[in-house]
């Protein structure tokens, strides 16, 4: 099985959002109390209902083009431990159904598939089998929200 790196939203982006309550798209943000479990994109844990979260617009792309979408993501309102086990699939996402989208080096979508977290490594191995795949975004299949990125290890 190939090695992978699982990448949350970078710490500088999260710190700026928490300190300023503004995102990189000019939105004024609020701290909300979640009414259902929600994934924090900094620590890659599922926050239970009743957790104080910040919802902000995030663009997980370094390229431009029609696939470089911006979407809503949550992070804990208070500092949390950033995800560091970059070689391990985030445990809280194992029981979830997920969308895996492979993007090429130019930022165009190259391939995609749906899989449960228990089959994540198999799905990633399939998508990265093609050398044109530069990164894979793991997303919520119903809402399309970005969860985290994956690169070859």
Image (cartoon, grey):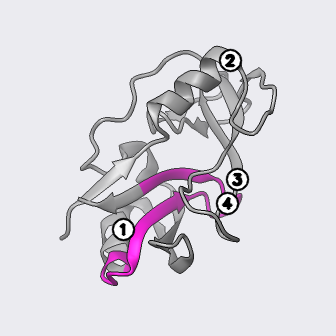
> What is the spatial separation of the Cα atoms under label 2 and label 3, in whole angstroms?
19 Å
Label 2 sits on a secondary structure element that is helix
- Image quadrant in which the C terminus is located: bottom left
Query: 64 or 142: which is nearer to us?
Result: 64
Which circle's residue, 3 or 4, is located before the other in the chain? 3
Horizontal placement of 120 versus 80: left or right?
left
Compared to residue 7, the image places residue 118 above or below, namely: below
Q: Name the mark nearer the viewer: 1 or 3.
A: 3
> What is the spatial separation of the Cα atoms under label 3 and label 4, in whole angstroms?
11 Å
Q: What residue is shown at x 80% (from left), y 32% (from top)?
A: 27
Query: Can you give x and y, in whole percent of width and height, for residue 146 in the image?
Result: 59, 53
Q: Are marks 4 and 1 in contact (CB under 8 Å)?
A: no
Residue 130 in which image quadrant: bottom left
Q: Name the mark nearer the viewer: 2 or 4.
A: 2
Query: 20 or 94: which is nearer to us?
Result: 20
The residue to which callout 4 is attached is 144
Query: Can you give x and y, in whole percent of width and height, for residue 111 in the image?
Result: 50, 81
The residue to which callout 1 is attached is 119
Which circle's residue, 2 or 3, is located before the other in the chain? 2
Residue 61 in which image quadrant: bottom right
Compared to residue 6, the image places residue 133 above or below, namely: below
Q: What residue is shown at x 46% (from left), y 30% (from top)?
A: 11
Q: Are marks 1 and 3 in contact (CB under 8 Å)?
A: no
Which circle's residue, 2 or 4, is located before the other in the chain? 2
> What is the spatial separation of the Cα atoms under label 1 and label 3, in whole angstroms?
27 Å
Mark 4 surroundings within 10 Å by alpha-carbon count, few (fewer than 14), some (14 through 19), many (20 or more) = few
The residue to which callout 3 is attached is 70
Q: Tag on residue 20?
A: 2
Magenta stretch in the rendered image: 127-149
Mark 2 surroundings within 10 Å by alpha-carbon count, few (fewer than 14), some (14 through 19), many (20 or more) = few
Which circle's residue, 2 or 1, is located before the other in the chain? 2
């Amino acid at each position: 099985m190939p090695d992978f790196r699982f990448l949350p939203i970078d710490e500088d982006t999260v710190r700026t959002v928490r300190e300023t309550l503004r995102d990189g798209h000019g939105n004024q943000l609020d701290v909300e109390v979640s009414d259902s479990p929600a994934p924090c994109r900094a620590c890659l844990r599922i926050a239970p209902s009743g957790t104080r979260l910040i919802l902000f617009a995030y663009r997980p792309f370094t390229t431009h083009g029609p696939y470089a979408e911006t979407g809503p993501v949550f992070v804990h309102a208070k500092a949390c431990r950033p995800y560091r086990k970059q070689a391990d699939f985030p445990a809280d996402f194992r029981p979830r159904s997920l969308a895996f989208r492979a993007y090429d080096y130019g930022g165009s979508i190259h391939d995609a598939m749906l899989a449960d977290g228990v089959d994540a490594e198999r799905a990633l191995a399939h998508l990265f089998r093609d050398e044109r795949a530069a990164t894979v975004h793991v997303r919520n299949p119903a809402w399309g929200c970005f969860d985290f990125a994956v690169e070859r290890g």
